[in-house]
Amino acid sequence: MYDAARVRGLYTSLGEGWIYLNAGERPQIPEKVVSGVSTAFRTGPLVESPEPGSRHSANSVFGASHLASATRAVADLFSVRSDHVVLGPSSFVLVRALSHAMSGRLRRSGVVGARDHALNEAFARYNLTIAEPDLGTGEIPAWQYRNLIDGSTRLVIVPGAHPYVGTATPVEDIAEITHSASRAWVLLDATALAPYRPIDIDSYGVDIVLVDLAALGGPTLSALVFRDTSMFPRFDHPLEVGPIDSGLLGGVSPLIDHYAGLEEDLEGQRAHRLRESMASLDVYLSSLLRHAIESLRGLYNVHLVGITGEAAGYGMAAIDRVPRLTFVVRGIDAETVQQRLFSNSLVTSLAPHDPLLENMGVFEAGGALSIGLAPFNTYADIDHLTRVLASLG
């Protein structure tokens, strides 16, 4: 049984009475990560004393072991071996390096991206075709990929979920369509998925996964994960990402340990505990999200973007979602609503000028607020949010 009260104790930042509903913008950092980064910054430059029988050389420094430990941790997160993982200082650096490494393959072929997705910029110089979202729900329908992908396509970029509306992309369906029609690789940006559910690269059917570890409450590092090491020799250029701060690397393994320990009393290897723990988290937060949707839909003055209203349609309930929501309070601008929530100890995010939100008409109504649920959020948090919003009516 998932115990949110116990999980709250793993975040020392939660002891001051604030209710944090802004995980999509600024996730809280687990205590293990804070401690791990602090230790790594102190020990990174130090020479490591080898244990008898150790593979480390006599003059190796702790920084090298931080890199190896971080790589193993990310491998466990995606159920692959360590040699499938490439770490980098940011998603931008990693994707730019990937674009350069694949330049020969992509120059004479096609790339399929999603409308206004951040990764498109790195591939804009190639023949880029765009998949469009449904402006009623925010979902990217899989069926359109049958018309976008042909034998010349070499890369398909798929966002795992919209970071503000919360609609999950049918990744498996898109991957199946892609591989049946071309030899293209599917690149999944899992940054909005990874904090909420287990991701097995084989189960999703994708070839490359990108994740920003800061979105999970980790250090400001990112990772590319490859389905198979046989993909590396097919690059036209080496995948070069530059140096990584060893102090930040020291927070990666504690981050993955934290997620593996969300479900208490699990046994076995970390990769196994991680899958079980993330599955429990997925069930819990999916239930909490349903409670939030049902509670906020009951307020006549609140519009849930992509959920309520005629444009969302009757199929809304069948759409897969991550626990992120964006809402508008009718007749009150978003900044005023945010301040009212803040005065009641509720921390939310002003929805940024995201292109999808703009096309859905959000900013014509005075802006919107976004909430992102985290492992420590509770039903009481949602009930308090609902009461405060109801008082604005």
Image: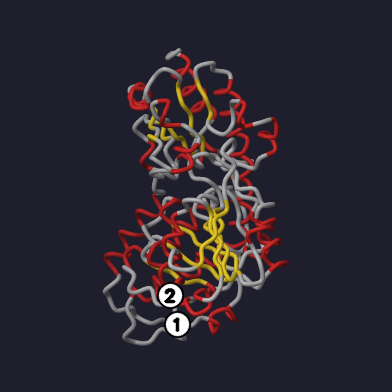
Q: Is residue 366 left or right of residue 81?
A: left
Front-lying residue, 111 or 15? 111
Which residue type does callout 1 highlight?
Answer: His
The quarter of the rendered structure image containing the N terminus is top right
Front-lying residue, 53 or 299? 299
Mark 2 and mark 1: Cα distance apart in space: 7 Å
Q: Is residue 335 above or below residue 375?
A: above
Residue at 35 percent across and 53 percent down: it is 34
Q: To which residue does mark 1 refer?
A: 237
Where residue 173 appears, x then y in whole percent? 70, 56
Front-lying residue, 296 or 258? 296
Query: Which circle marks residue 221 in the picture?
Result: none
Q: What is the crowding at mark 2: few (fewer than 14 residues within 10 Å), some, or many (at least 20)?
A: many
The image quarter in which residue 314 lies: top right
Q: Is the C-beta separation of discs 2 and 1 under 8 Å?
A: yes
Instruction: Tell me the SS state at disc 1.
Output: loop
Q: Is residue 89 left or right of residue 357?
A: left
Q: Residue furthest right?
A: 180
Q: What is the crowding at mark 1: few (fewer than 14 residues within 10 Å), some, or many (at least 20)?
A: some
Which residue type does callout 2 highlight?
Answer: His
Instruction: Tell me the SS state at disc 2.
Output: helix
The image quarter in which residue 56 lies: bottom left
Q: To which residue does mark 2 refer?
A: 100
Front-lying residue, 70 or 159? 159
Residue at 54 percent across and 16 percent down: it is 300
Residue at 40 percent across and 74 percent down: it is 65
